[in-house]
Amino acid sequence: MDGILTKILSLPPLLKGGWGDYGMGPGMMGGWWGMGWIFMFIFWGILIVGLIFLIRYLVGTTKASKGEESALDILKKRYARGEINKEEFEQKKRDLL
């Protein structure tokens, strides 16, 4: 009976793993001499910047896919349909360019 009691009482120091009051170890924040927080900021910074670039890329492609016409294209179409004459077309073209 004395041997079992001794084994049970000596178990808690073995569970600590030699890290003192940290329990299972220093974890992410205490590793590498307390510089884990720097790597956490770098990770989240890269993640946020990546998301920003992804959103800007996706928004940019939707704008380009709409196929907005330039003012000169609209002017050429109006001239082709006969809505404006040649003098008016040439004057507006000079104004645009």
Image (spheres, helix red, strand yellow):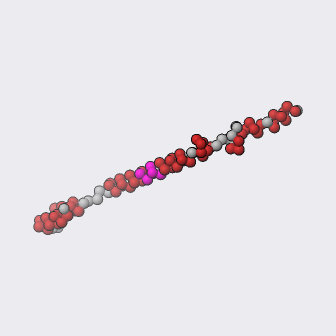
- The foreground one among 87 and 1 is 1
Q: In the rendered image of this protein, does residue 44 appear above or below residue 90?
A: above
Residue 75 in sight here = no
The number of callouts visible is 0
The residue lying furthest to the front in this view is 33
The residue lying furthest to the left in this view is 87
Quadrant of the image for the N terminus?
Answer: top right
Tell whether 90 sits left or right of 47.
left
Q: Which portion, as a residue range, is magenta? A: 47-53
Q: Position of residue 4 (x, y in %)?
A: 84, 33
Tell whether 69 sits left or right of 93.
right
Quadrant of the image for the C terminus?
Answer: bottom left
Q: Position of residue 84 (x, y in %)?
A: 15, 67
- The foreground one among 3 and 72 is 3
Q: Main secondary structure of the magenta part?
A: helix
Q: In the rendered image of this protein, does residue 22 appear above or below residue 96?
A: above
The residue lying furthest to the right in this view is 1
- The foreground one among 91 and 66 is 91
Q: Position of residue 67 (x, y in %)?
A: 29, 56
Q: In the rendered image of this protein, does residue 77 appear above or below residue 50?
A: below
**Residue name at image x 16 percent, y 62 percent:** 80
**Residue name at image x 73 percent, y 38 percent:** 15
**Residue name at image x 14 percent, y 67 percent:** 91
**Does the stretch in magenta take in 16?**
no
Residue 21 in sight here = yes
**Residue name at image x 75 percent, y 38 percent:** 13
Q: Position of residue 75 (x, y in %)?
A: 19, 63
